[in-house]
Image (cartoon, rainbow, N blue to C red):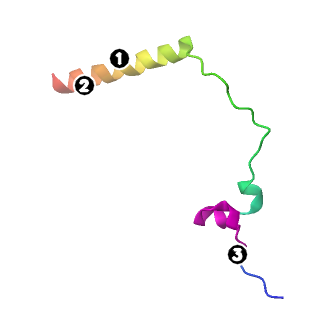
Amino acid sequence: MRRALVVTDESARHPFRMHLPPHVCRTSAAVPARSSWRFTMQDLKMFLMAYSACLLAVTTWIG
């Protein structure tokens, strides 16, 4: 019996994914999806820091 050097998975539907081993393409149902996204104070703080840093950089570059 002759076997191919590269085993392909035709159900992958993408040329790259066809050549991956089966354990890589398996989807895991154990990972729960986040049902809702919450905007926290840490998110607000990081947004304001990034906004002010970009504003400072642009005004320094223009002025």
* Quadrant housing the C terminus: top left
Residue occupied by mark 2? 58
Q: Is residue 16 above or below residue 38?
A: below
Q: Quadrant of residue 11?
A: bottom right
Seen at 22% across and 21% down, the residue is 59
Left or right of 19? Residue 53 is: left
Instruction: Please tell me whether mark 3 sits on a helix, a strand or a loop.
Output: loop
Q: Quadrant of residue 39?
A: top right
Which of labels 3 and 2 is toward the front?
3
Q: Is residue 34 located in the magenta-colored stretch of the structure? A: no
Instruction: Please tell me whether mark 2 sits on a helix, a strand or a loop.
Output: helix
Residue occupied by mark 3? 6
Neighbourhood count class around disc 2 (C-alpha, 10 Å): few under 14, some 14–19, many 20 upward: few
Q: Indicate the amino acid at tag 3.
A: Val
Q: Which residues are magenta?
A: 6-20
Residue occupied by mark 1? 52
| N-terminal-most mark, 3 or 2 | 3
